[in-house]
Amino acid sequence: MVKTVVKKYQVYDYNDLKNNDELFDKCYENWLSNPDNINGWSDENIESFKTFAEQLNMKIDYSLSNAEYPDRSCYIKLDNTNYYYIAPNDRVKHISEYIKDYKGNGYYICDNLKTYTDKLINQWNKDYSINDFSKDIENKMFDLWFEDNQDYFSKENFLQLVECNEYEFYECGDKVFLEGEE
């Protein structure tokens, strides 16, 4: 004989989380601790970096975590060896030409990198090298990556995700999964 047991659970939605700090914190902490929870824009961010490096006629190598903050294994490295064959005083002119009409892949990181590069070009002086330029772009990419992750993992973003996706949670803070979800 097979018995079916039905148990009812109280579930909580956006309004409940918004009005109950303790419940919100439980749900937020569970969401943060989920190892499958990664920034949904990470692929676009990487593609933006690749697109920009390609536009600069540089190769890119990277290792980035999907966390809010970098760890020791994280890096971004641009290979600028294509510039070694260009006279040092002509390098800034080449970079300017490469990015003059740059539109990127339509994602905000490309615009951000273009604006930052324009600033570097305008401040370029005889003591500024292609290695300095590459390092500045690497650092900017690195900062953009982790700023975007910090924004994604913020409490404000979590609450927006709950509202937009109509997520519901159990009292213990676990997300309610509908059939076929997970």
Image (cartoon, rainbow, N blue to C red):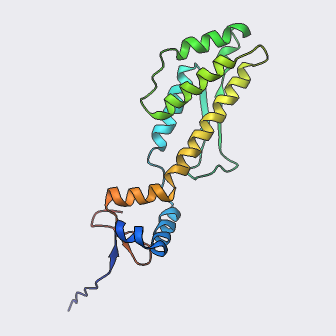
The residue under the point 48% across, 66% down is: 28
Residue 85 appears in the figure: yes
Q: Is residue 8 left or right of residue 82?
A: left
Seen from the viewer's position, the closer of residues 153 and 80 is 153
Q: Residue at x 53, y 20 (%)?
A: 55
User: Measured from the top left, where is residue 9 in percent x and y?
Assistant: 32, 81
Is residue 87 shown to the viewer in this render?
no
Q: Residue at x 28, y 85 (%)?
A: 7
Farthest residue toward the front? 19
**Of all residues shown, which one is farthest toward the left?**
1
**Residue in view at x 29 percent, y 67 percent:** 178
Compared with 122, 142 (above or below) is below
Count of marks overlaid on the render? 0
Q: Residue furthest bottom?
A: 1
Q: Quadrant of the C terminus?
A: bottom left
- Horizontal side of 80 relative to 159 (left or right) equals right
- Does 17 sit left or right of 181 as displayed? right
Quarter occupied by the N terminus: bottom left
User: Residue 44's spot in the image, x, y percent?
Assistant: 45, 38
Position in image of residue 165 (x %, y %): 32, 58
| Residue 56 vertical position relative to residue 45 in the rendered view, above or below | above
Front residue of this view, candidates 139 and 164: 164
Image quadrant where residue 115 sits: top right
Q: Position of residue 27 (x, y in %)?
A: 45, 69
Compared to residue 28, the image places residue 151 above or below, namely: above
* For residue 132, above or below residue 17: above
